[in-house]
Amino acid sequence: MTKVYCYARCTTCKKALKWLADNKIEYEQIDIKEDHPDEKTLRQLYKKSGLPLKKFFNTSGQLYREMELSKKLLDMSEDEMFKLLASDGMLVKRPLLITEDTVLTGFKEEEWRKAL
């Protein structure tokens, strides 16, 4: 089953969910703020995605900016980054699409079309 971590007030998430509905793709929606992925899950998703770990951070989020993570991530270890991501779902890039074969961060229609 396809899973999508979203935040209800995120316009990109709304666009992604509309695209899924328009394309009649079944999915399980998970509220990233209330039920965010834990560290173990994030490690699994990262490995499956093949993406750089920094792509999992919501760089346009208010919390990311408040914590000045653009400066701090450069000096953080991978373990520290995973712990930080697992601490608050608002730090995780969304929507986060998880299929049997792939993991995608953010919504780019062409990437989602290929994955689904």
Image (cartoon, helix red, strand yellow):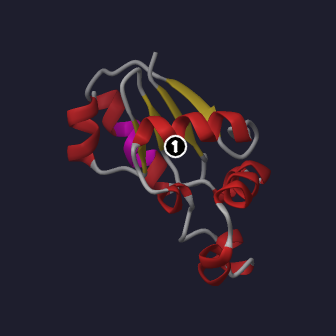
Q: Is residue 5 left or right of residue 23?
A: right
Residue 108 x/y as whole percent: 30, 51
Question: Looking at the image, which residue sits at the far right?
Answer: 87
What is the magenta segment's predominant secondary structure? helix
Q: Residue at x 52, y 43 (%)?
A: 46
In the rendered image, the vertical position of residue 5 relative to residue 71, given as above or below: above
Residue 25 x/y as whole percent: 33, 21
Residue that mark 1 sits on: 46
Residue 73 x/y as whole percent: 63, 73
Question: Identity of the amino acid at label 1?
Answer: Tyr
Q: Residue 52, located in which quarter of the rendered image?
A: bottom left
Q: Assess disc 1: are there few (<14), some (14-19) or many (≥20) residues with their C-alpha within 10 Å of its C-alpha.
A: many
Q: Is residue 9 left or right of residue 66?
A: left
The region drawn magenta spans 14-18
Residue 18 x/y as whole percent: 37, 38
In the rendered image, the vertical position of residue 36 relative to residue 3, given as above or below: below
Which sits in the foreground, 48 or 92? 48
